[in-house]
Amino acid sequence: MPRGMFKSGRLRKVSVRTPGSRVAVHYRQRKPSKALCASCKKQLAGVPRNIPSKLRNMPKSAKRPERPYGGMLCSACTRLLLKQQARGASP
């Protein structure tokens, strides 16, 4: 019988083969949902789906794309926004 903390849906079950060749059930944290574009709600490419403790140990350049609005907008929406800003800036 699993302990109370393992009965919730917070953890997922993973079957692991141990060195003694028996299959044990390990409980691991679930991955967070994928990052979405703030404008069109499309999934963002280049943004990892890791738990916060693993994200903390990653370099900043691996956490999101190195471009304006990286990690917030998809490349298509960023392109549109930059075009609109450029048009508004010129008289």
Image (cartoon, rainbow, N blue to C red):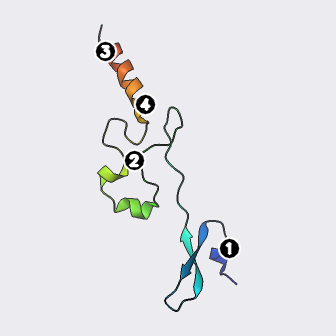
Q: Residue at x 36, y 51 (%)?
A: 63
**Extreme-top residue of the structure:** 91
| Amino acid under disc 2 | Gly
Query: Could you tell me which quadrant the N terminus lies in?
Result: bottom right
Q: Residue at x 43, y 36 (%)?
A: 74
Q: Badges 1 and 3: C-beta atoms under 8 Å apart?
A: no
Q: CA distance from mark 3 to mark 2?
A: 30 Å
Depth check: 5 or 50 in front? 50
Q: Circle 1 is placed at which residue position? A: 7
Q: Badges 4 and 2: C-beta atoms under 8 Å apart?
A: no
Query: Could you tell me which quadrant the C terminus lies in?
Result: top left
Residue 84: percent from left, percent from top: 38, 19
Q: Earlier in the sequence, mark 2 or mark 1?
A: 1
Q: CA distance from mark 4 to mark 1?
A: 42 Å
Against 82, residue 91 (above or below) is: above
Q: Circle 2 is placed at which residue position? A: 46
Q: Nearer the viewer, mark 2 or mark 1?
A: 2
| Amino acid under disc 1 | Lys
Q: Circle 4 is placed at which residue position? A: 76
Horizontal arrangement in the rendering, residue 25 relative to residue 86 (left or right): right
Residue 73: percent from left, percent from top: 43, 36
Q: Badges 2 and 1: C-beta atoms under 8 Å apart?
A: no
Q: Badges 3 and 2: C-beta atoms under 8 Å apart?
A: no
Q: Earlier in the sequence, mark 3 or mark 2?
A: 2
Against 17, residue 34 (above or below) is: above
Q: Earlier in the sequence, mark 1 or mark 3?
A: 1
| Amino acid under disc 4 | Ala
- Categorize mark 3 by other alpha carbons within 10 Å: few (<14), some (14-19), many (20+): few
**Extreme-bottom residue of the structure:** 20
Q: Circle 3 is placed at which residue position? A: 89
Q: CA distance from mark 2 to mark 1?
A: 33 Å
